[in-house]
Structures are given as structure tokens and as C-alpha cells.
Image (cartoon, rainbow, N blue to C red):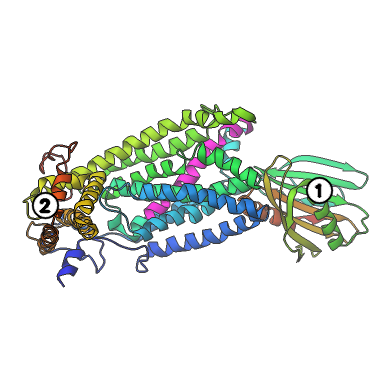
Amino acid sequence: MGSTGTPEAPARPDESSSQRRTERRWPPLAGVLALIAFVTLGARGIGAVSVTGPPVGFQGILLVHPQPGWTERARSEEDGSHQLLLTKGAARLSIFAIEDTPWTPPELALDYARSLSTELSEFATDPPTAVTLASGGSALRFGFVGVTTDGIAVQGEVTASVTDRAVALVFEVQAQPGDLGWALDDTERMIDETEVL
Amino acid sequence: MASRVRHAHLHHRSLLQPKEPAFWVFALFVVGGAIAIVDVLARLSRISTSGYALSWLLLAIYAVPVFVVVYKLDLYEREPMSLALGAFAWGAFAATALASAAVGWDEVVVRAFGQDFAARWGPAITAPFVEESMKVVGVVLIYLIARDEVDDVMDGFVYGALCGLGFAVVEDVLYFMGFFGGSPGDVVQGFYVRVVSSGLYGHVLYTGMTGMAVGFVVSRRSDVPLATRLRVAALLAGAGVAMHALWNSPLLDLVPRDPHGAAWLLYPVALAFKGLPMVAFVGIAVGLARRRERRWLDVALASETDGEVLTASELQTLREPRRRREAVREVRRRAGAPAARLLRRLQREQITLAMVASRVGSPDDPALVEQRDYCRSLRDALAAIPGAASAEAQAADAPGAPGPPPRGGETGGSAQDPR
């Protein structure tokens, strides 16, 4: 059809002015990039201006600041063992705190991996890596994959840490395939911003 | 020099166009998407290596024939293979990764309509909007990379459908491994539900329609006002998105819950209630686009049927891929394989003649004259092979051949660019 404006297809001398058309390269490309940016980031933009939920946590132990869209779904506290579940869509962040723990972070991570392996079939983990939390505490982090009893595959990441006051902390994020990336963006920020009291 | 003149009016561009900024955007998103998706798939493969391998094997059995059928839908001008594979790769890697990254729309629906409504209707609202827009972006980028290659509505369908096919393949692997469990038995179950029962109705159709919208906007600039093109494109794209929304919606959801035994056999029937109207709708749209392609060929070659370059009966053969194949078979039977190859080449060059004719300004354009000479020389060479000419004539005059095509001007196509 119209001239491409490239050397391979020069405008013909006999071409009428109505046929001659200078193809614009940049405006349509800018439109494409704008569409991609809107679809991929637009909802986050809407979420960012929305009010985030109030901090949640365990009294005297920790305080978590939920990212937009994360809401508390369940909680249990008994005998120095605390559990909190936050969700956003199908992604779940489980937070466990156990007081007076004798464990080190590697022992805690290993024990947690063992318990996950009893809940998930086809369970497999990535090699653990040592991370330093924004609070200054050291932690071990490992990714995992497995299949729930409902037959649904989940991917996740566990961050295990022990505070100076011997409180074992475990943050476990679980998401369905394809959702883990954005879930980790949120949860790693929440973990970094967690206040250990 | 002469052949350069002839081919200056043709347009067989490859995907690799480093001078086009759109190429680098395309490459960036495909490579980035591939890295992200391969990482997700690699994690899932640890659930069951055999299930993972089986997923790809089964999907290859489905995807390769679909790719070939879509690729051959264009009656006269097959798209460059690099662009076709590029469209597939965009759907498989870039569109899937971008759709995965587009998080938060479900939350927007929850906030706007409440949790219960979102649970029922969220997938019908967010997924079509996110996925269709990210897939059709691939068609737009292909157009920006090689503008001459999207020169009719059918081209838009082909590129869109191939984007959709790539998307469907990767999504199916994610479903087989993720939502069905990943073991070989789970994968077979997933294949039955998502491909055997509903493989006809999915992303290939939706993005084929949105691709047609792109094809219509960019290919009809010479004869359709912008406002009309945008209206038609909105209808076509809206149809693609609406089909996706219908598929994801709870409407006509007749699929048995937690099926056992013979209930599994109801799956294809239940899904057909939603799917077959979509197939029929897209079939009509594709049929109209192909009819327009035939009109384009008739108009473009109307003044060339002088008997030296092309006869009227050869034009009839040329209009239908099936009749072209039959003519080649007949020539092969009567005059041997070299004659059949020569006829196939002549047919290809006669279609090229139509393309050149529709692109040049004058019937005496050097490129057109040269292409005529080339076709003439091929016809002479074919006629010199004993038995070839009579076989070709017999195939062209075979019963069932449609009547002569209308002359240019009777078809409604414009003389300069009838497509």
C-alpha cells in the first residue's frame, strides 16, 4: 500500500499526492507503549492512590503495613504462637510468630520446609539464600513449588528469621503460577517494612 | 536491475528490521517475556518432568496443525514466515508476561462492584480487556515493523490468530501444570478439557477478530474514511473482546461440576453451546474477508487475461487454492513432476502479477511489464513440455468451476488498490 518511507520503497514519480503518505514511526509506537503501560500499571496506580489498610500484627511482637489490596483474612493466637493470613486476590501471605524459640534461622527454615512438604505434594524447593531484612535482622529465604490437596499447583517463597528476643518469624507467600511475581513485589516490601517490636 | 524493479513493488519483509524502532520494542518485550515465562515454567516443571514434557508434546500436536491452517488462510499471499513466527512468539512470551504483570484489575472490580459480583464476573471483565489488548499490541507492532505486510483484513486475522495461538499454548501449559496438577494423568485431563473440548473456541478466535480490526484500519486508508474505519474496527475488536468475555462469564455455563465417569463426555457438548456460535461468527468474518480477496484478484488481473499471460480459465483456477492444487496434480499425472513444479511457479508468479498490478500507477509500469514477460516465459516453458498444457487446460475447465469473474469496476473495489 502506501510508501513506507524506507529506501527500499521510494515514492513513485507518478504517484498522486493522495497516495503519497509519510508513515509516522514514533506516534503509533508511543501509543502502543502507553497502552502497555496503562494495562500493566494502571490498576496499581489506582491501588496506589487508594487508602491502604491499617497496620496489622501481634501485640508487642510485630507490626505489618499491608500494601494496597492486601486484607486480613484470618488470625489465631495461643500460647505464644501467633498466626496471621493476608490475601490479595488468590495470593496469600501467612505470617507466623513463635515466642521463645530455641531455633536458628536455618533450623527454622528447615522445619518449615518439612511442614510444607507434608501439606503439598510434588513439593520442591530452591536452594535457600541468606538475606538481611530492612530491620537489620538476618533471615533465610527459599522458593518452593507444590500441589495442594485440591490438585492446584502453587508457587511460593518463605522468609524465616529469628529476632533478638528469640521470636521465630516466618513469612510465607503462596500464589498460583504466573501470580508469584507481583505477589512477591508486594510481600517483600511488606516484610522489609515490618516493625519488630 | 530488472528484477530489482519488479520486486521493488513487492513486499516480503522479514521480522528483522533493525532500522524500525518498533522492531526493538517488539524484541525487548518478547525477550523479556520469554525470560519471565521460562522462569515460571521451569519452576512448574519440577512438579513432574514427565507431565511437563507431555504438556508440550500434546500441545504441539494441537498447535502445529492450527498454525498451518491459519497460515494458509490467506488465499494468495502467504505472510513471511519470520513475521508469522514473530506473531506466535509475541503471544507466547510477551503477551503472557504482560498479562501476568497487569495485576490489580481484579481489585478494581472488587472495589467497584463488590466481592460477590467480582467473584462471578471478574474473569469476564478483566481478562478479556487485559489479554486481548496485550495480544493485539503484537499485531500493531508487526504492522509498524513491516507495514506492507498487513495489507488487507485477512492479514490482520492471520497475525492476530497466530498471536492468540502462542498465548493459548503457554497458558495451556500453565493450566496443565498449575491448575490440573501437573502429573501425566492431570495433563491428559487438562488437554481433554482445554484443547479437545474447547480448543476451537479460544484465543485464536478472539485475537483473530481483534487482528482483523487492525488490518481494517491500516489497509483501507485509500478507500474508507477514518471515522468509518474506526467504527468497523471497534465492532471487530469489540466482537473479539465480547467473545472472550462470554467464554469467561457464567452465562451458558453448562459444564458439569466435579464430573465423574460418563459426565466427562458432556464436556465438549456443554462447551459447544458457548463455542460454536463464536466459530460461526468468525467463520462468516473470515469468509467475507476471503471473498474480498477474490474480488481483489479479479480486479487486479481483469486486464491481464489476454491469453498470453493468463487465460480466463486460469484465473478461475487461480482464485481457489483447491483448484490450484488440483491443476498441479493433474499436470503432475500427465506431464511429470518438473511440469507440476513449473505450473506451481507460474501460479505463484501470476498472483505476484496481481500484486504488482495493484501497486503500480500505470499499466505500462516497467515492473508490471517485466512481471508479465516473466509469466509469459513460464507459460511458454510449460507449453513446451508434452502434455502439460492440455492437462492444465483440462484442470481449469473441470466441472464445478465458477463462472467468469466480474470485470474490474463491477466489483466495488477501487481500481488502484482494490484490496
Please give the range of residues in magenta. Answer: B115-141
Q: Position of residue B311 (x, y in %)?
A: 10, 49
Instruction: Answer with left or right where residue B389 lies relative to residue B271.
Output: left
Question: Which element type, helix, strand or loop, lies under badge 1?
Answer: helix
Q: Are marks 1 and 2 in contact (CB under 8 Å)?
A: no
Residue drawn 77% across the image and 57% down it: A159
Q: What is the chain letter for disc 2?
A: B
Residue A64 seen in the current view: yes
Residue assigned mark 2: B310
Q: What is the chain letter for disc 1?
A: A
Number of the front mark, 1 or 2: 2
Residue drawn 84% across the image and 47% down it: A58
Question: Which element type, helix, strand or loop, lies under badge 2?
Answer: loop
Name the main secondary structure of what is drawn in magenta: helix
Q: Which mark is residue A118?
A: 1
Report which quarter residue B260 is drawn in. Answer: top right
Q: Are marks 1 and 2 on the same chain?
A: no
